[in-house]
Image: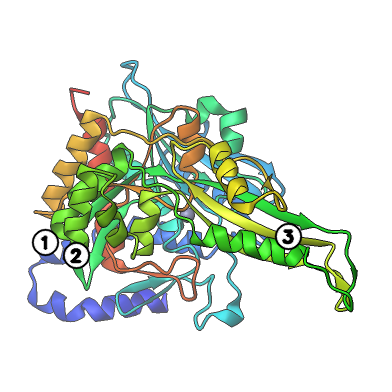
Amino acid sequence: MRRIGLALALSLPLSLSLPLPLLAQARTEWNTVAHDLLKQLIEINTQESNGSTLAAAEAMAARLKAAGFADSDVTVLSNAPRKGNLIARLRGKKLGKKPILLLSHIDVVEAKPEDWTLPPYTFVEKDSTFYGRGIADDKDDGAINLALIMRLKAEHFVPDRDIIVALTTDEEGGPANGVDWLIKNHRDLIDAEYALNEGGGGRVKNGKKLSHDVQASEKKVQNFMFEATNPGGHSSVPVKENAIYELAAALSRVGAYDFPVHLNVITRAYFERSAPITDVPMGPAMKAIAANEHDAAAAAVLATDAQYNSQMRTTCVATMLDGGHALNALPQRARAYVNCRILPDEDPDSVQAQLQRLAGDKVKVTKHRGVAENSPPSVASGLLMTELERNTKEMWPGLPVIPTMSTGATDGRFLRTVGIPTYGVSGQFYGPTNAHGMNEHIPQKAFYDASEFMYRLVKSLTGSPIS
Ligand SMILES: [Zn+2]
């Protein structure tokens, strides 16, 4: 209560000089609903070690029922102890159109209070900023999606298809991924023509909005183990054949190697549309690579930026090492782990073959911990792209909508793999995110603007007579 009091006090000078309707715009009824949902979500600890996504899912289910949703349209499914998933449905007209799925995850990265200067599981508002673990990733989207269907219901808006909101567990790497489990066990509950998910948002540089980015593709993750073995012996009589040296030489060759540049429909559009809003020398290099992916000079310029480099090609990097067994023994075994981010349309087997060529015949390369999921790029349907552009233009005139490929992974890969195209769309504009970091935060205005944007977008996607 004290924090809300503070927020009101800060807006008081405005209230003295502005007429009432303008004051109402500053904090609408629906901003308040989204705010309160976010506060409640943040204050339920949902980290893997000692939190409960089940508690968060149940709390949000209760909020939906209090807002008039029928019990039969609000489902909480637990797929492991303390793990919960909420699936809610706003019923649409029966026109035979497949639903739209609004996906977010309610689990969060671990937050140790001693590593923070603010309490991670208290919703803190100060200096027009919201703080708390999960506030940028991804409880903000959960609160926005819930507020949005509550608002549509309160307006008696009947969409031209069902709108499904799913808040799921274990996106951040826990053992009970909710999306994967729902696809395998309750596909009917979340089946959709397409999904809107995290992973997109505004591009902001030095406080200036540059573009509204829509994530339509993700790289695949595949880990490999490099292993060299040797009979070993006493370290006082070394021989030239040495497992650690062989491994080190193999890793040096991997470090020096660049996978070929290869653009897909999303990354080509990304470079093409980003070129006019990007400074020299990157802007012209983007234009050149979009026109011809074999332009080596342009690729060399872009490769000096780690982000652009990762958009153009598969990357592999050594992340962990382990080897030897005694200070006075020749190593019998040396291992390294190499983490690859593979382009969506590239085959992990061909990446493995290339790594094995680089490693040479003394070092064995094998896949480590599972096999990369296939994740084809999602190509935006006409109506979705039209409405994204129209609503962006209405709220942020002059900003281009630009498709992007994430170099990291989200739950979108599970949906894309089973044929549900998935787009990262958020309407949130702020500078570099500190998701997963200390004192995770987002600007209050970015949250409220995003809430309004998503409401307008989903309404226009489901209210239009054409599709
Ligand atoms: Zn996330």
Q: Is residue 203 left or right of residue 18?
A: right
Q: In the drawing, does residue 394 fall left or right of residue 418?
A: left
Q: Which corner quadrant of the image does residue 282 belong to?
A: bottom left
Residue 100 appears at what percent x and percent y?
37, 32
The residue that mark 1 highlights is 21
- Decide which of 219, 54 is in the foreground and name it: 219
Mark 2 against mark 1, which lies toward the viewer? 2
Q: CA distance from mark 3 to mark 2?
A: 40 Å
For marks 1 and 3, give the one nearer the viewer. Answer: 3
Q: Secondary structure at mark 1?
A: helix
Disc 1 under 8 Å from ligand 1? The reply is no
Q: Quadrant of the C terminus?
A: top left
Residue drawn at (31%, 80%) of the image = 127
Q: Position of residue 234 (x, y in %)?
A: 92, 73
Foreground: 235 or 421?
235
Q: Earlier in the sequence, mark 1 or mark 3?
A: 1
Q: Residues within 10 Å of mark 3 (few under 14, many from 20)?
A: many
> Which percent across, then down, holds residue 123?
46, 70
User: Relative to 413, does residue 35 appear above or below in the rendering?
Assistant: below
> Of label 2 and label 1, which has the lower sequence position?
1
Q: Which mark is residue 281?
A: 2
**Residue at 60 percent of width and 66 percent of height:** 110
State the residue in front, 428 or 316: 316
Mark 2: amino acid: Pro
What residue does disc 3 label?
A: 335
The first of marks 3 and 2 along the sequence is 2
* Residue 235 occupies quadrant: bottom right
- Left or right: 441, with 389 as reference point: right
Residue 74 can be seen in this image: no
- SS category of the residue bearing label 3: strand
Picture residue at 15% right of the left edge, 75% below the top: 15
